[in-house]
Image (cartoon, helix red, strand yellow):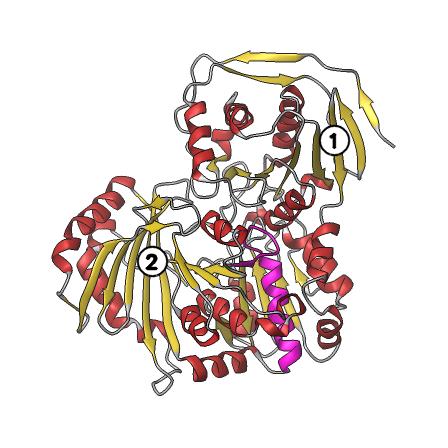
Amino acid sequence: MATSSPSPSVRQVLLSAPFSDQKPGTSGLRKSSRQFEQPHYLESFVEAMFQVVPGVAGGTLILGGDGRYGNRRAIDVITRMAAAHGVARLITTTGGILSTPAASNLIRKHQAIGGIILSASHNPGGPEGDFGVKVNGANGGPAPESITDAIYSATTQLEGYRIVDGETPSLEAPGTYALGGLSIEVIDGVDDYVSLLQGLFDFDAISQMLRGDFPIAFDAMHAVTGPYASRLLEGLLGAPAGTVRNGIPLEDFGGGHPDPNLTYAHELAELLMGSDAYRFGAACDGDGDRNMILGQRCFVNPSDSLAVLTANAGLAPGYVGGLAGVARSMPTSAAVDVVAKDLDIPCFETPTGWKFFGNLLDAGRITLCGEESFGTGSDHIREKDGLWAVLFWLQILAVRRCSVAEVMTSHWSRYGRHYYSRHDYEAIASDRAHGLYDRLKGMLPSLVGASFAGRSITTADDFSYVDPVDGSLTSGQGLRLLLDDGSRVVFRLSGTGTQGATLRLYLESYVGTGGNLDQDPQQALGDLITAADQLAEIRSRTGMEQPTVIT
């Protein structure tokens, strides 16, 4: 039954001065929780968004987040601001828990004007952690730069914001409510997403495998995928109770860092890499769009994962008709390129950021896409999707009846192996990071033809991309060293952190089918690692003897 409150009056709140630090990055506005708790800070960014996003008055808006500290307060504020700006319908979820891929699906299903996803993705949460606000467009994907740039411009000129004073739903149970002219629907955030995946994968085949002698472990990292994974894996697919670990979303993610890699998901990694108790393991990040895949004593590099999904796509009912094409971000290894060539389908190399895949997906140019930062997805939504990737892997294993390690060995024996690694140097003082990067950028013209790790540099550039759909140019996307044997070294400064800067070093070396396919990646890439450090003076300029994270 619908409940309503008296029509509230719109209140105009004046600002003494606009904020100057609300420029969104590749995945929205991310700042510390304390910054978002400043008076008017959240409201200012949301006001700018409502002023810029098309169709706000009379439109439908999707709203939810990953459950981190600040999630409930933000939903309350945004709901009251939506009422003040004439939004007709707002859809949110029980507990305010909504994964990024599930939000993308809801936007598309309800033909919404877009969505607001409250998350700082894989960044830590809690009062001393981070918070984030991401705006998604009507296609379900991240808002394009034209929108985020306009939002930022509006924040720098803002004189005030509009909000109503009224009671918003508790979010404890589904229901329909009214706040003035705004209809608020609280729904179960899991149902629609589960239905979507049931149309893509053979749940009966996966269930038969999981109910047999095939123990698996899934780590939700006390983040948003806990309820989704519990419903899918332990509920519908019949995996034993306890399969989903750390499945209750917590405001501070249990004090952990919800980033699914070998460093921050080390407990899961130790279970799979250090024992034979489980056949398959996986983890997802804070907002549910990233994934890590593990087998029995086997780690699957995210670049290889995209290549394997592409090579085995026909095993999943949702992709049995073939693939229109594939795409990867520039720092991602070229493993999927080799598969695409074999399948005779297009393969696109884009800048980092899912919005670039969105254009290709909307145009029907690609079906699968992925990036090295543990993100893979397809045309079923317009975001990367962690649990989708987990189910895709389980689908492959259920059909092929083999181990993860056997899948990888078979793949490399057919396509060769792209030894690949990413080294992250986190929380570097910004002046040091930019000094290192700017120095290296200035050296690029003189590096062509130079010797590097026993090879020769054939290309040294700052990657730029002309979008094949809309013709837009995106430049300054990373410093590339392309070597004469097909190896690559890439340097990027990341915009996803909230403290200092993160230098990411990407290393890749290809070994063909007749070569040594069973090396440790860090050893196989050792000469490239040494040469990259010497060229960029990483240790001396950052003061760091080793990376914070190696993947």
- Tell me if residue 128 comes above or below residue 371 in the rendering: above
Q: Is 42 left or right of 328, judged from the image as shown? A: right
Q: Is 544 left or right of 95, judged from the image as shown? A: left
Give the magenta part as a residue range. Answer: 376-400
Quadrant for the C terminus in the image: bottom left
Q: Which residue position holds label 1?
A: 184
Q: N-terminal of the two: label 2 or label 1? A: 1
- Tell me if residue 297 comes above or below residue 100 in the rendering: below
**Where does the image place residue 328, in percent across and percent down from the top left?**
43, 60
Q: Which mark is on residue 106?
A: none
Q: Residue at x 39, y 80 (%)?
A: 416
- Taking the magenta stretch, the answer to whether it contains residue 389 is yes
Q: Which mark is on residue 547?
A: 2
Q: Magenta region, mostly helix, strand or loop? A: helix
Q: Residues within 10 Å of mark 1 (few under 14, many from 20)?
A: many
Identity, as a three-letter code, of the amino acid under mark 1: Ile
**Where does the image place residue 52, in percent across and percent down from the top left?**
51, 27
- In the structure shown, which secondary structural element does the residue marked by tag 1 occupy? strand
Which of 424 and 447 lies nearest the eye of the viewer?
447
Marks 2 and 1: which is nearer the front? 1
